[in-house]
Image (cartoon, rainbow, N blue to C red):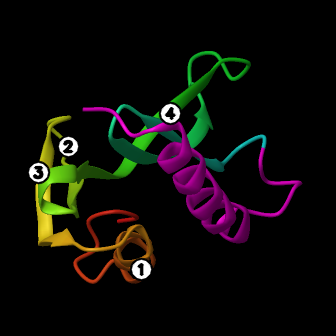
Amino acid sequence: MALSEIEKKRCEKIVGAYIEKHRPPAHIRPELDVGFRVKDQSVEIFEIRPVWRNPKEKMENPVAKATYVKIHNLWKVYWRRANMKWYPYEPAEVSRLEDFLELVEHDRYGCFWG
């Protein structure tokens, strides 16, 4: 089940503030930027870079994802491996969206930012 409009706006506010704080300086953004999207019950953070064959075209490289499980009132945390599949990140569940962002920030295992 998708997040309600109120929940979605709350997620956008929280993650948007995190992204703004962690974006590279403005002069670097054409070469590397960070973005996010809220879709259904998931929040996804990704890097934005030019496509190497066509620098005018941009590509997104997913970094981290959290999916809200309403019946358990928790967020499941995932990272994306080189095989392009999402895998649970340890700890695999957090109770708040802010806890997910803290995991991404510290990246204890080097899974999100490398």
Question: How many C-alpha atoms fall within 10 Å of the one at disc 4: few (<14), some, or many (≥20)?
Answer: some
| Dot label at residue 19 | none
For marks 4 and 2, give the CA distance.
Answer: 14 Å
Q: SS class of the residue under badge 2?
A: loop
Q: Report the Cα–Cα distance between label 4 and label 3.
A: 18 Å
Residue that badge 4 annotates: 60
Q: Which residue is mark 2?
A: 82
Asked whether disc 1 touches disc 3, contact meaning CB atoms under 8 Å apart, the reply is no
Q: Nearer the viewer, mark 4 or mark 3?
A: 3
Q: CA distance from mark 1 to mark 3?
A: 18 Å
Q: Is residue 8 inside the magenta stretch?
A: yes
Q: Nearer the viewer, mark 4 or mark 1?
A: 1
Q: Earlier in the sequence, mark 4 or mark 3?
A: 4
Q: Nearer the viewer, residue 56 or 111?
A: 111
Residue at coordinates 51% horizontally, 44% vertically from top-left? 8
Residue 89 drawn at (x, y percent): 15, 65
Q: Nearer the viewer, residue 90 or 2?
A: 2
Which amino acid, mark 2? Ala
Residue identified by numbered label 1: 102
Q: Which residue is mark 3?
A: 87
Q: CA distance from mark 2 to mark 1?
A: 23 Å
Numbered disc 4: secondary structure:
strand
